[in-house]
Amino acid sequence: MNFPLILKDELNGFYKSWVMIFLWIGLPLLAIFIHISIPNQAGLGSLSILTALILTSIASLLSSTMLAANIINEKDTHVYPLFLIRPIKRWQLIISKFLAVYICVSIALIISIMLGITIDYIETPNLFEFILESVIDPFIMVFAIMLISSAFGTLIGVLSPSIVVGVVLVIFLGQYVSYIPTAISFLLNIGDPLVMVLVTSIITASVLLGIAILVFSKKQF
Amino acid sequence: MTQNNDIVTFQNISKRYGPFVALNNVSFSIKKGEIFGYVGPNGAGKTTTIKILVGLLRKTGGNLFINGYKMPEQKELAHRFIGYTPQQIGLQKWKNIRQMLTTFGILSGYDKRLIDRRIDELLTIFNLIKFKNTKISKLSGGMIQKLGIIQALFHKPPILILDEPLSGLDPESRFQTKNLLKQLSKNGTTIFFSSHILSDVQDIATKICILNWGQVLKIGTLEEFKNEFTKEKQIEIILSKRSEKLYEINNISGILNIIEKSAENIIVNIEKTKNSDEIIHNIIKTLLINDCKIRSISPVNPSIDEVYQFYLRRGGGYQ
């Protein structure tokens, strides 16, 4: 079983990378900053929701960019041949990288959002139950969007010939791709919108990753 | 299937990139324990051959067997027997040497309990033990090159495929690596290596293949190359005293001609079929009788560079 080893390796690499250090520190700081700088007015509901959405857009952009840049860089620096001449499946390399980034960025997001909820609780302890209830939906949305943007970053990483092209594609197309499930859910208007978003997110991410694996499997190094 | 005890069988392999033919019906076989030196100019197709051998590139035509396994169909089985050093060694820079070798060791199926010991053993051989916990990003090009060789040797594979393994190494490391490869070959490891450095090929290869423009020009042992290259044998004579009767040696049976490089330095071409010991004996006798004083007399062997240039000039392959 080589997959757990490769995944552990990738997690080790990502959690202490410069981008992740920025996210570990930057996202919680941003969450605090939003809570301090925006007054929590009654009509706005919980600031945690706003914080979650702002942080997600930043984190999803960074995770997809990080994934694309990392894969392109490893292709350019000939990292893959030494893995591919060992008894290992190509999909394992791609999925381990995707999961490593998804897990790391998700944890950073959870920490930041939890920090926001804590601040909300300190400021308005009587509204805590309402805050918790209202934050669940955006919380699920956050991870659905993250799932797609990370899968999109992986696909661009596999397809793109250069880091510049890859980053440009991720920045300009990534946000549109990330909101595909939300748009589908809104347009179809079937059942629980949140469940629809989740299902379409998982399907879209699986398709994107499937294409990435297929292209990577055909690649000659 | 493979023939007799061939470990590597490369049969009529072709590789095309659109209209460009990188390899054109290249064939060779390597037996257990052989050190196969693969030489040729830039763009000859050496790296393409190696990438097809290890299953990183798909061939356009032909058959390839590694240790009896058909490539690329059975490459996951074949990979267990291969150690590979690419020309451009790419390592994940955030890892340190120990982490990198542990990952590759486990992926290659090396016993986890013995990995630390193996890391120490190999790093000691290559003088890298004090850098065991140093990040890859902090290492020099030469150290990376050594790591490229170490990771290939790690799981003690019976087949080593090395693309320019000695380039970038300092003279001492090159000497040590060559000795190590010779030792591994004696113990039964089959080694395929490409090189631009002909003296390295001469030092360790038991069989040499010259490739140009995607075609094999010649395969053979160094002796076979030299024998075919030399139409006649040469003897170099250096005199400390010369006499007018020097050219008496022209009358010795088996001598074709004499070339004067300088007044004291003479090259004598003798027939390939004749016994050179007998002729040298007669030359010495004739020179001494004719009042010449001999400083040295020795057979001249063509260098590997001369042999290589000869085959490249003679041509072959398409252009």
Image: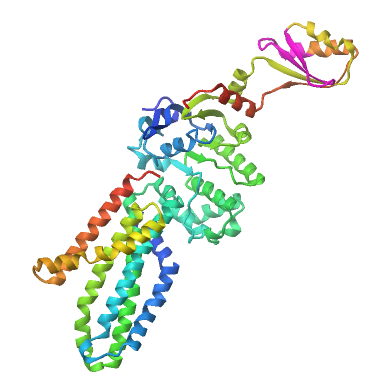
Of A25 and A58, the residue lying toward us: A58
Image location (x, y in percent) of residue A25: 41, 77
Residue A163 placement: quadrant: bottom left
The residue shown at (35%, 59%) is A97
Image location (x, y in percent) of residue B93: 49, 59
Q: Is residue B155 visible?
A: yes
Of B222 and A47, the residue lying toward us: A47
Of B231 and B220, the residue lying toward us: B231
Image location (x, y in percent) of residue A50: 27, 81
Single out the residue that lies furthest toward the left: A190
In the picture, measured across the screen, residue A182 lies left or right of residue A83, that is left
The residue shown at (39%, 30%) is B14
The residue shown at (41%, 70%) is A20
Query: How is colour applied across the structure in the image?
Result: rainbow
Image location (x, y in percent) of residue B160: 49, 39
Residue A117 placement: quadrant: bottom left
Residue B230 colored magenta? no
In the picture, measured across the screen, residue A57 lies left or right of residue B215, that is left
Look at the image and tell me in which quarter the N terminus of chain B lies: top left
Question: Which residues lie in the magenta part?
Answer: B254-280
Residue B265 colored magenta? yes
- Looking at the picture, does residue B189 appear above or below residue A95? above
Q: Is residue A79 visible?
A: no
In the picture, measured across the screen, residue B203 lies left or right of residue B105, that is right
| Tally of marks | 0
